[in-house]
Image: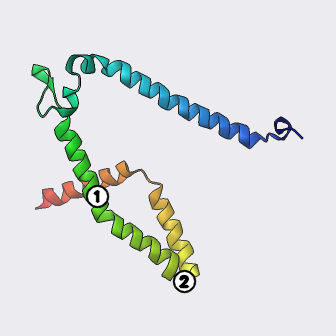
C-alpha cells in the first residue's frame, strides 16, 4: 500500500499549518530585512557595537540594549530556574496522585498564558502599590 493512499486528513491539516506558519515567519523576516536595510547600509557593524543612541544625530548603537537584554535574561534564569525545577520535581515525585492531577492542570493553564499578560498584571499591581505609598 503506497503512502499516498494512507494520507489521513489530520496529516494534511498539520502539513498545511506547518507550511503556513513557516511562510509567515519567512515573510516577516523578509519585511524586517527590507525595512532595516537603509540603517544597516549606513551604519554597518557599528550598529551592534556602538554605545551611543542619538536618533536626532543619526547615531544608533545597540550594544547597551543587547547587554541589558542578556543581563535581564541571565538574572531571570538564575531566579526562576530553581523554583521551576523544584516545582516540577515536587509535583511529579511527592504529591499524591489525586492532588497531582489538579496541580499539574493548574500549572499547564498558567503556562499557556503569554508572559506579556503576566507583565501587564505586574505593572498594574506595582503601579497601584507605588501610588499608595
Percent across and percent down for residue 116 are 35, 48
CA gap, disc 2 to disc 1? 30 Å
Element type where label 1 sits in the image: helix
Relative to 121, say whether 62 is above or below: above
Give the image quarter of residue 45: top left
Q: Would you say the residues marked 2 and 1 are in contact, meaning their CB atoms lie under 8 Å apart?
A: no
Q: Residues within 10 Å of mark 2 (few under 14, many from 20)?
A: few
Q: Which is nearer the N-term, disc 2 or disc 1?
A: 1
- The residue beneath circle 2 is 96
At x 28%, y 63%, the residue is 78
Task: Indicate the position of residue 96 as horizontal and vertical percent values.
Answer: 54, 83
Residue 21 in percent (x, y) is at 55, 34
Which label number is shown at residue 76? 1
Quarter occupied by the C terminus: bottom left
**Which label lies toward us, 2 or 1?**
1
Q: Residue at x 46, y 71 (%)?
A: 88
Amino acid at each position: 500500500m503506497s503512502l499516498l493512499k494512507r494520507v489521513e486528513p489530520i496529516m494534511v491539516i498539520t502539513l498545511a499549518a506547518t507550511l503556513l506558519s513557516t511562510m509567515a515567519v519567512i515573510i516577516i523576516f523578509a519585511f524586517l530585512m527590507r525595512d532595516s536595510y537603509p540603517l544597516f547600509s549606513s551604519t554597518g557593524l557599528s550598529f551592534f557595537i556602538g554605545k551611543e543612541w542619538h536618533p536626532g544625530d543619526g547615531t544608533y548603537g545597540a550594544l547597551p540594549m543587547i547587554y541589558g537584554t542578556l543581563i535581564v535574561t541571565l538574572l531571570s534564569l538564575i531566579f526562576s530556574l530553581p523554583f521551576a525545577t523544584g516545582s516540577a520535581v515536587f509535583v511529579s515525585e511527592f504529591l499524591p496522585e489525586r492532588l497531582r492531577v489538579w496541580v499539574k492542570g493548574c500549572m499547564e493553564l498558567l503556562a499557556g498564558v503569554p508572559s506579556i499578560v503576566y507583565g501587564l498584571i505586574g505593572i498594574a499591581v506595582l503601579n497601584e502599590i507605588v501610588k499608595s505609598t
